[in-house]
Amino acid sequence: MTAGSAPPVDYTSLKKNFQPFLSRRVENRSLKSFWDASDISDDVIELAGGMPNERFFPIESMDLKISKVPFNDNPKWHNSFTTAHLDLGSPSELPIARSFQYAETKGLPPLLHFVKDFVSRINRPAFSDETESNWDVILSGGSNDSMFKVFETICDESTTVMIEEFTFTPAMSNVEATGAKVIPIKMNLTFDRESQGIDVEYLTQLLDNWSTGPYKDLNKPRVLYTIATGQNPTGMSVPQWKREKIYQLAQRHDFLIVEDDPYGYLYFPSYNPQEPLENPYHSSDLTTERYLNDFLMKSFLTLDTDARVIRLETFSKIFAPGLRLSFIVANKFLLQKILDLADITTRAPSGTSQAIVYSTIKAMAESNLSSSLSMKEAMFEGWIRWIMQIASKYNHRKNLTLKALYETESYQAGQFTVMEPSAGMFIIIKINWGNFDRPDDLPQQMDILDKFLLKNGVKVVLGYKMAVCPNYSKQNSDFLRLTIAYARDDDQLIEASKRIGSGIKEFFDNYKS
Amino acid sequence: MTAGSAPPVDYTSLKKNFQPFLSRRVENRSLKSFWDASDISDDVIELAGGMPNERFFPIESMDLKISKVPFNDNPKWHNSFTTAHLDLGSPSELPIARSFQYAETKGLPPLLHFVKDFVSRINRPAFSDETESNWDVILSGGSNDSMFKVFETICDESTTVMIEEFTFTPAMSNVEATGAKVIPIKMNLTFDRESQGIDVEYLTQLLDNWSTGPYKDLNKPRVLYTIATGQNPTGMSVPQWKREKIYQLAQRHDFLIVEDDPYGYLYFPSYNPQEPLENPYHSSDLTTERYLNDFLMKSFLTLDTDARVIRLETFSKIFAPGLRLSFIVANKFLLQKILDLADITTRAPSGTSQAIVYSTIKAMAESNLSSSLSMKEAMFEGWIRWIMQIASKYNHRKNLTLKALYETESYQAGQFTVMEPSAGMFIIIKINWGNFDRPDDLPQQMDILDKFLLKNGVKVVLGYKMAVCPNYSKQNSDFLRLTIAYARDDDQLIEASKRIGSGIKEFFDNYKS
């Protein structure tokens, strides 16, 4: 497969192109089903499948009270709540009789259709043909489970996987469990949105000169794992021009891109120091269309003429993590291999979680249904509006926290820089060493700083603990990651920011003294 | 480790004894966590964990209507329903703020405690010490997921796994995906409860003479996987005396026993031809204690002085399959390795499923709470009562089906034998070839029979499709598996039984004619 080749639209060419990416273990996987899933006519009595009749389930019905507004506690907003009722027969397309029963490993059809439509509207793969039949979506049990299934399918002892030098380190555990090797990819740590994230120059040099480079003893990478938007821990997003360059490198050096995107919908407009709490999400002319087109970063899928991108999304950040519900988007050949693994391991994600998500999205749509929209459109529109409210709240928290950090004595003394995030749940704070040299024992010094922060009453994550290779990233690890997601309210974020300022100031007051 | 050695009560001896059973891949598994899970005091603000505040979840509350009686549709039974209310703060020990949040991989504590107590009361491991600290339970995402995690932990290319010659074949897929080899273990297919199930003579000979036996080119088995009670597909249960022999073999030949027990609670008293619909579950003197002591088969755990048994249970058959919720019982060393795998792959099972199960069990307890019972006892008692009702219903369905089968012309002409099941969801029907020789092309003939059954309007599973090695089990595969679990009602089971009779009769009417 070479750059610029015609899109591999059919299954035969997908198979030819992507078979070489499969792990050694894939061949041992096949579901030995003893049943025959073919439909039987209504007058045949089913005594084959070992499924309990739904009347054996102790749950007769479930009623959900759904908040249409996050942090909804204004009792006057009667219409800010809605409800959903589920029972053995209702909603007709996904009643309890279905969602509490054994079900298709790939996900229950009504939710699956919603999700494919959702992806198709926002990040339709560039290799998609008119029938949309060469790509698909499967549900999975949270992004960690998605990752596991993806890496088990495309990685083994012979595989080298590239990962941003700072990352959600459990992803590494996941890769390494397959026997594959992980190498760190240099990032530009800056709040300049046009240059932040993966260092494309570095990546190009590394790949173009692999055989003479630092990892020449490893096989050339077959996979790039990237959290390209609102990255964890940095909050940075790879700008569009870099995405294009990275995709071209993927074509030239023939690697797959695993794009993990749990945070992307939480987009942050730039901070306005003149008006710190300005929130463009509150603007009356912010339509869902504008949010999707002007705010959100586009997935690598939208550049993917070759079908080499695997995208992971999750309901954890925009609905709830306890659902353990996520989805994987990929070309049909690779996705089938991922599904083969699910078939013999986890099988389907929780049907109760699927039912709750589906019913909530549907209830939000119904409570806003206008005559001009079909149910399908209303569900999409309603869900995007919910997501925008979550994003708006995160944006407010981000602004509030930046403002409070900037007001600290420590900041004003130049002791730290805030890497204003472009999306997500995290803010990183880079320590400025000023007249001091950057310490040789950076991790130890950061541990000391951490003690001062705890003493001041705030708990954060130290950057060096999220380095793929602490030695490689030694020069860059003098940062703290804080999350704006968990705090109770604005006051707590403001208080925490003050404490961070005090902690850093105390650290320097005691530094080398 | 040899037979009769002192129980390995502490972690050090568990480690020494069971380290050799770990798969090659275990060593690659370690969660690279960047967070520090230590408790922080209340006055420290948490900005570390990337968890959304629970007020970001769109679900404000969930109300469950719970049926205390399966197939509950008598509107007069007001008190046959109860309810459970869940909201962000309630129930206090497992509110939505917890169950919808990121959570412990091993399961949410309130449910986990219930489950450990449950196992401890019914099948306390023989190796357990007074503190119960050398064994534990973890939750998992359905028994298929449990199996996967267990086999990935104890199997690799070097492992031979013994499985009953007929089995739930996806279990084989699960084993084979690790690279391990599966060999079939001969079963006695009989309705005599004292001799049915694994052929212990065969097993003894096979293991004692391994180096000259049919599988001498494989490594000696390190694992026996067995569905010892209400086996799938046969409905048979390994009697107690055989369990003791098998456990002794496990000690002598040093293998682990993976006991998969999804069906064991559905115990069937013997069929009474004089009074076919007699149901001992309806007897007024059937206490929960009698059910547990006199009805249920005891787990291999209760014989397990060495800590070599891994037990799998699930909520699928006694609550609902769509929950994807199960649990694994094992010694703490092996269980930790299984948990390590969960930590880097699926993580926790669905919190919503856990919340629904916990709240249901608690609501059942509350609605029956008497002053003499603690909440813990009431939950145990209430849940067993629910399980007994499920078992009662299954027993009724079994009796009804046997009666209807025995009334068919085909049965009375001696064309089939019913292997009356001792537990579970399945009945197998053995074809009697009578004056004919057993056909050489048995699978083909069974396929023809299947067509006659479908033509008569009933769908079943053919025995040969559930053989571990169809060639090995060729002589025994002339049976049909039918399930009594899914049918709508009594009438449908009676009608299906008639159709089975007609289908078999038509098959023979056309056989070799």
Image: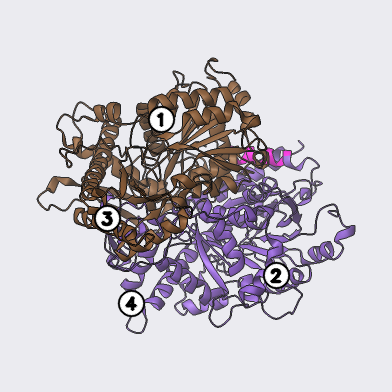
Chain colours: A brown, B purple
Q: Are marks 2 and 1 in contact (CB under 8 Å)?
A: no
Closer to us: B395 or A211: A211
Residue at 64%, 74% (x, y): give it.
B12
Separation of residues labelled 4 and 2 (CA atoms): 44 Å
Q: Nearer the viewer, mark 3 or mark 2?
A: 3
Residue B454 falls inside the magenta stretch: yes
For the residue marked with disc 4, what is the amino acid?
Answer: Leu
Separation of residues labelled 3 and 1 (CA atoms): 36 Å
Separation of residues labelled 2 and 1 (CA atoms): 50 Å
Residue B65 appears in the rendering: no
Circle 4 sits on which residue? B369
Left/right of residue A492 with respect to residue A238 in the rendered view = left
In terms of secondary structure, where does tag 4 sit? loop
The quadrant of the rendering that contains the C terminus of chain A is bottom left
For the residue marked with disc 3, what is the amino acid?
Answer: Gly
User: Residue B92: x and y, percent?
Assistant: 29, 67
Provide the residue span drawn in magenta: B444-455
Closer to us: A455 or B192: A455
Discs 3 and 1 lie in a common subunit: yes
